[in-house]
Image (tube, rainbow, N blue to C red):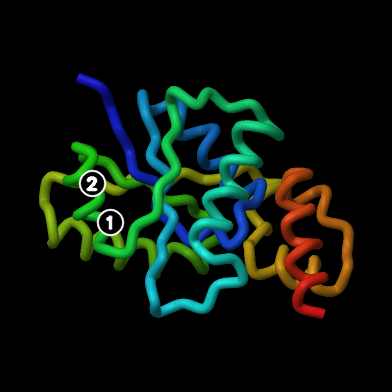
Amino acid sequence: MRKIAIYPGTFDPITYGHIDVIRKSLSLVDNLIIGVSNSSNKKYLFNADERIEIIKNALFKDLRFNKKKLKVITFNNLTTSLCKKYNSRLILRGLRAVSDFEYEFQLAGMNRKLNKNIETVFVMSDVENQIISSRFVKEIAELNGDLKKFATKSTIKFLKEKFNEIY
């Protein structure tokens, strides 16, 4: 039986922190589904289609990840519903710092209450990537800072184009 995991998030945009979690996750599972949240509760810089394009460019063009092991999809329902749809019993979540833990712990508990057959596994990114957040990456991009340590070449290009459109 193949191990399939769901890695849900906003990925607005994908960063080296996310990529670190993806890389580590691929050593734990056979297939990883990256679920790009399109919840109406949040305000995004990039729409869902743009975020999917950015992720695919970062993973498959910039970094040459194996397309057979990864699938990138959008969703706007419960993560547990996504698990059911893709026959996954595993949700992967990245942790950066202690400040992430309380929210992630509560989220894992709620998902467990929704479906007791689904486990949440926390994956830590490497130390050099733990400080990276999409919010900071967007702020650095908006202020025309150097993003090479935080995102792939194609992601940086998307960010620059987006902020050129805005200003």
- Badge 1 crowding class, 10 Å Cα cut-off, few under 14, some 14 to 19, many 20 or more, is some
Report the residue at 44% width, 43% height from top. 72
- Name of the residue lying farthest toward the top: 1
17 with respect to 113 (left or right): right
Q: Is residue 28 above or below residue 102?
A: above
Residue 106 x %, y %: 30, 67
Q: Residue 22, labelled with which disc?
A: none
Q: Report the front residue among 83 and 68.
A: 68
68 with respect to 2 (left or right): right
Residue 151 x %, y %: 72, 49
Q: Report the front residue among 108 and 142.
A: 142
107 with respect to 157 (left or right): left
Report the residue at 54% width, 33% height from top. 23
Q: Report the front residue among 156 and 17.
A: 156
- Badge 2 crowding class, 10 Å Cα cut-off, few under 14, some 14 to 19, many 20 or more, is many
Report the residue at 64% width, 26% height from top. 64
59 with respect to 155 (left or right): left
Residue type at tag 2? Cys
Residue hosting label 2: 83
Asked if the residue under mark 1 is in contact with the one under mark 2, i.e. CB atoms within 8 Å, the reply is: yes
- State the CA–CA distance, disc 2 to disc 1: 6 Å
Q: Report the front residue among 20 and 166.
A: 166
Residue 129 x %, y %: 67, 49
Residue hosting label 1: 79
Residue 141 x %, y %: 80, 66
Q: Quadrant of residue 31?
A: top left
Q: Is disc 2 placed on a helix, strand or loop?
A: helix
Q: Is disc 1 placed on a helix, strand or loop?
A: helix
Quarter the C terminus occupies:
bottom right
Quarter the N terminus occupies:
top left
